[in-house]
Amino acid sequence: MRTYRQLLTERLLAAFVTAGITPPDDLVIEVTNASDPRFGDYQSNAAMTAAKLLSTKEQKVNPRAMATQLVEAMDLTGLCEKPEIAGPGFLNFRLTKEALQGALSSLITDERLGVPAVDAAKTIVVDFSAPNVAKPMHVGHIRSTFIGDSLARIARLAGHNVITDNHVGDWGTQFGMIIHGWKTRLNHDALKQDPIHELVRVYREINAATKADESVLETCKTELVKLQQGDAENLAIWKECVKLTLDQLHDIYGRLGIQFDHYLGESYYNDALAPLVEDMLTKGQARISEGAACVFSNGMKKPEEDPFLINRDGQWTPAPCIVRKSDGGFLYATTDLATIDHRVIEWKADEIWYVVGAPQQLHFRQVFEAAHRRGHSTRMVHIAFGSILGPDGKMFKTRSGESVGLLEVIDEAIERARAVVEEREFSDEEKAKIASVIGIAAVKYAELSQHRMTDYKFAWEKMLSFQGNTAPYLLNAYVRTRAIFRKLDGEVKLEPEVSFTEDAERQLALKLAQFGEAAHDVLEDFRPNLLAQYLYELAGYYHTFYEACPVLRSEGVTRNTRLVLADTTSRVLKSGLGLLGIETTDRM
């Protein structure tokens, strides 16, 4: 299975050979969706790019003449009309009516809806969400959780072997305070009612006490050391904290429709840290500096590309990655290196994707470079993202300055959605279900419709609107596609014979045929917003079709064609929203 973009690219490359033109080694032949549908369905500037690369001071290559050669050499039988040459050498391609009709007909029985599987499947580990134990998930987890889940879904559909790992923060100095608070201030009744809330209360009280009384801080340090040394009581308390947190996390992820293959937290790698650092020291990958084990620049990269150098006042100075502190303690970098070892050795990862905020860019540059020095050739990618802002354009916080809880956000979204559907003629059970679908979809889509590096304002009115590029708009578009079939008696048999009589039919069919391209485009730069934009545009094409082409009042092949278009649009919207982690509803 190949997309039209892939087929045109292959035939354009073949045309260079047929025309006797040797393309430059650094020529990247690209066919893109047409920016203006009046001039075609697809376009390419390959002739212009090749002409520029092949030109010399002595002899300039005319790009329009080259475009003419390519057009004459291209075999587009059964695919396109003769390409048009525009301006200095742009190639515009328009698919034939027969090709699009055939594509639409094939989608009737295609469970993948035109999404091709990759030629070479990889094992990809996706690391996302990663909340901390004994702390509630907050609005800051939205971006990592939703982006990571969507990328994992799309990579799986593309044919990759995807392993999702929630690298929870279940180890660290905070547990000294939590354990001391558990022993001295815990309210067991409150713990049963809301475990995380009670653990946060205890932690905050003890944290405040350490600042007022240094002896409390020393007690906490003692409790932490006992935990690290395997004290039975402290270990049991820690395990209970982890269990209570994971129980709540499973509940939250369940509501959001998100699943993980593994929950291997920081503690899983504790025993690997000391041997890892010793191995790095032995092999010269790290060295001792002021008592700490550090990774320094090895001088193999340009200073501006070296993660272990930083420019201060015009001078490149060392910025080492510490893997063991002078007191013997380990850091996030050490744990991340041990995690990479596990994922590469045990899971045979070809790629590891880290969906983590932009402020961690230097950390991951250093960790990836250190891992490569240790012999790992696995591709590691930091998929960074920006921040969620409040309506005032500042970081989204409560009035008291604390992070807004994720559960509170989801609950409020559902409550606001319930107000929208309250006057509809549904049972209370149906209203609750529909409100849940709309509310959760609104929060997810508000995130995933943004470029991941964009800081965006969290605005309830916009995300719950039925107008514009929102989840309610797309859900309503899906409902409209299903409404046609609810009006028909019994099961409708869709026939493969289709024929376009209106331009709106052709435009919708073309957009449906581009679903596979949109899905794969996401993985090029890890941008789910490209799929969201595609679905929004598809809904627009469907509404145009719905207004221009009566479905149930038509007859024969025309009626079948329009039913196929409606049904395929329905399936693509459902599948596409599903790739964004969004559930649909047949009524709203």
Image: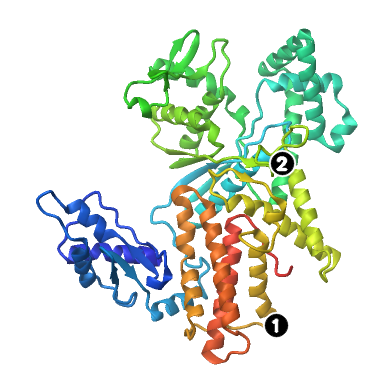
Q: Amino acid at mark 1?
A: Lys
Please state which of residues 466 and 356 is positioned toward the viewer in this rendering. 466
Dot 2: what SS? helix
Q: In which quadrant of the rendered image does the C terminus lie?
A: bottom right
Farthest residue, direction bottom: 556
Dot 1: what SS? loop
| Residue 233 visible | no
Q: Amino acid at mark 2?
A: Leu
On screen, residue 218 above or below 435 = above
Which disc number belongs to residue 487? 1
Give the foreground label among 1 and 2: 1
On screen, residue 102 above or below 363 = below
Residue located at (65% from left, 44% from top): 142
Quarter occupied by residue 177: top right
Residue 52 placement (x, y as % from top left): 21, 53
Residue density around tag 1, few if under 14, some if 14–19, many if 20 or more, within 10 Å:
few
Residue located at (83% from left, 71% from top): 425
Instruction: Residue under label 2, please give it.
Output: 249
